Amino acid sequence: MQQTETQIRPVGLRSTNGNGHPSAVDHTVTVPSPPDVANGRVAAAAQRLIPSEVFARTTWQRRYAAQLRLTDTLVVCMGVVLAQYIRFGTPGTAAGDFKYLVPGFSVVFIVVWLFALAAFHTRSPRVIGSGIEEYRRVIAASFWTFGAIAIVTLLLKVDVVRGYLAVALPAGILGLLLSRLFWRGHMARKRAEGGYQTAVLAIGEPDAVQNLANELTQNALDGYRVVGVGVPGYGPPRGERITVNGTDIPIIGGETQVLEAIRTCGADTVAIAGTEHFGVQGIRRLIWDLEPLGVDLVVSTGVMDVALSRLVMRPIAGLPLLHIEKPQYLGAQRFQKRAFDICFASAALIVTLPLLIGTAIAIKIGSRGPIFYSSERIGIDGKPFSMTKFRTMVKDADKQLASLLNANESDGLLFKIRDDPRITSVGRFLRRFSIDEMPQFLNVLRGEMSVVGPRPPLRREVEAYDCDLVRRLLVKPGVTGLWQVSGRSDLSWERSVRLDLSYVDNWSMTQDVLLIAKTLRAVFRRSGAY
C-alpha cells in the first residue's frame, strides 16, 4: 500500500476515502471482455447516453458555425456586389447583353465562392478558433474560386470580368479575414468566461496523462477543459483526483470505465496519452465504441513543440506513421531570412526616425548619463556582440545589481523586478511600449541579430546552459520572438526557454511575419512590459 502511494503521489493523486489517507490503487491489468460482452456494454452505454445529451455538448460549435456561415455569406455578397458596382455601375445600367449577363454571373460567382468555403471545411470544428489554419483555409478557398472563375472565363473568352475579379478578390478576402478575426475575439471572450469549452476525458499512464492535461489547460483561451482522467489498469474509481494547473480532476478508473465516464463527466472528446496499453486492437475497439456516442477520439503522439508544417501523416502497411520534417534554419532559408531582416530593419529605422530623435532628447533631458546603453549578448554560434538599446535606467545601474539580487522575481537565470528602482520615469514609458528596443535594428543591419528570433542571452546564462539549451545558439537572437508575444517578462524561465527552442526548430518566413504582427498587438497591450 505504501509502495503504491509513492508511485501515484508525484502526479498529484489525492484520496478522498473519508479518513484523509491515500487508498490502495490496483495496478492489475483488466483482461479484455469477450466480443459479445463488450458489444453488449457498448449498446447499454449508447442507450444510457441519449442523443440529446450528445447534441447539447456541441451546441456552441453548431451555433458558432452558423454565425460564421451567415457572415461569410454577407461578406461574399457584399464583395461581389461592390465589384459589380465599381466595374459596371448600378444594376440596369449595363448595355446590351451585359444587362442580364452581369447579375447572372454575380449570382454564380457567389454560389461558387460559398461552395468553396464549405468544401475547404473553413467552418469545421477542427479549425474554428485555431487561427493560422483557419485563415489559411479561407484564403485557399478564395484563391481556388478565383482560379476556377478565371479559367472558365478565359475558355469562354469573357474579357469583361477582369476588373470585376480584381476588385472582388482583395475585398472579399479582406472581409472574410476581418470577420473571422471578429468571431475569434468573440470566442476568446466567451472562453475567458468559461464558455465555448471542449470537455476532454484524458486516458494514459499517470505521468503522460498529467502532461497532456497540463498542456490542454495551460491557456484558457484554447477552450479545453479536462473533466476526467483514466489510468489503464486502475480498476473501478476510488474517489481519487489529480491536480493540474490548480484544478482537481477526478480519476474515473481504468479503460473499462471510459464509456460510463463519458456520461457522468459530460465529455465530448477522449484523448489518449500513449497507446502502449491499448494496442492496435484496443484502439480499434475504442474507435468503434465511441462512434455511436458521437464522441471524438484524439491520440497524443508525445511529440511537443513541432509546427504543423513539419508534420506529415504517412500510412505505411496499414499503420499511420507521423513523419517529422527537419528544421529549416540552414542554407537558402538563412539567406532569405537575412534579406528580410535588412529590408525590414531599414524600413523600421527610416519610418520611426522622428520618434527615435524625440526619444533621445527625452532621455538626455530626463536624467544624467548616455542616451544609449550597450551590454554584451551571445549571438549565433556562441559569438559575443554588443547589443544597443535606449538607456532606461539611471547611470551606472549595473553597479547596483548585487544589492538587488534578493529581490529577483524570476524563477531562472534571468533577473527581473516588476518595480525596479533603477528605472527612470522616461525609461518606464519607453519599456511600456518597447521603444527602448528600437536601436536593436542597428544590430540587425550589422548582422548580429535578426528581426525575429530567440531572446538575446547574457554570457552568464549561456555558461549555465545544458546540451539542450545550446540549441538556441543555432540562430541569431531576435528583436522580437515567441517570448515577446507570449508574456515577455511575465514568462517563467522554463516557458521562455521552451519558446526559444520551439522557434529554432519550427522557423519559417510565414511564422516570422505573423510574430511581427502579434508583436504590435503585444506592445499596445503592454502585458509583461517592465
Image: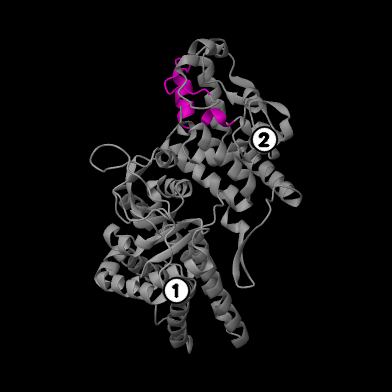
**Mark 2: amino acid:** Cys
Q: Residues within 10 Å of mark 1 (few under 14, many from 20)?
A: some
Residue 518 belongs to magenta span: no
Residue at screen point 63% across, 35% down? 469
Q: Mark 1 or 2 closer to N-term?
A: 1
Q: Residues within 10 Å of mark 2 (few under 14, many from 20)?
A: few
The quarter in which the N terminus is drawn is: top left
Q: Secondary structure at mark 1?
A: helix
Relative to 33, 277 lies left or right: right
Q: Which residue appears at 33% of the width and 69% of the height?
A: 66
Instruction: Report the magenta residues as a range.
Output: 415-438
**Above or below, comparing residue 19 to residue 292 in the picture:** above
- Percent across and percent down for residue 93 are 42, 81
Vertical arrangement, residue 264 with respect to residue 344, above or below: below
Q: How far separated are the C-alphas under marks 1 and 2?
A: 47 Å
Circle 2 is placed at which residue position?
A: 467
Q: Is residue 431 magenta?
A: yes
- Disc number at residue 118? 1
Residue 40 x, y percent position in the rendering: 33, 75
Q: In the image shown, does 60 or 144 lie closer to the viewer?
A: 60
Mark 1 belongs to which amino acid? Answer: Ala
The reply to whether residue 347 is in sight is yes
Question: Which label sits on residue 188?
Answer: none
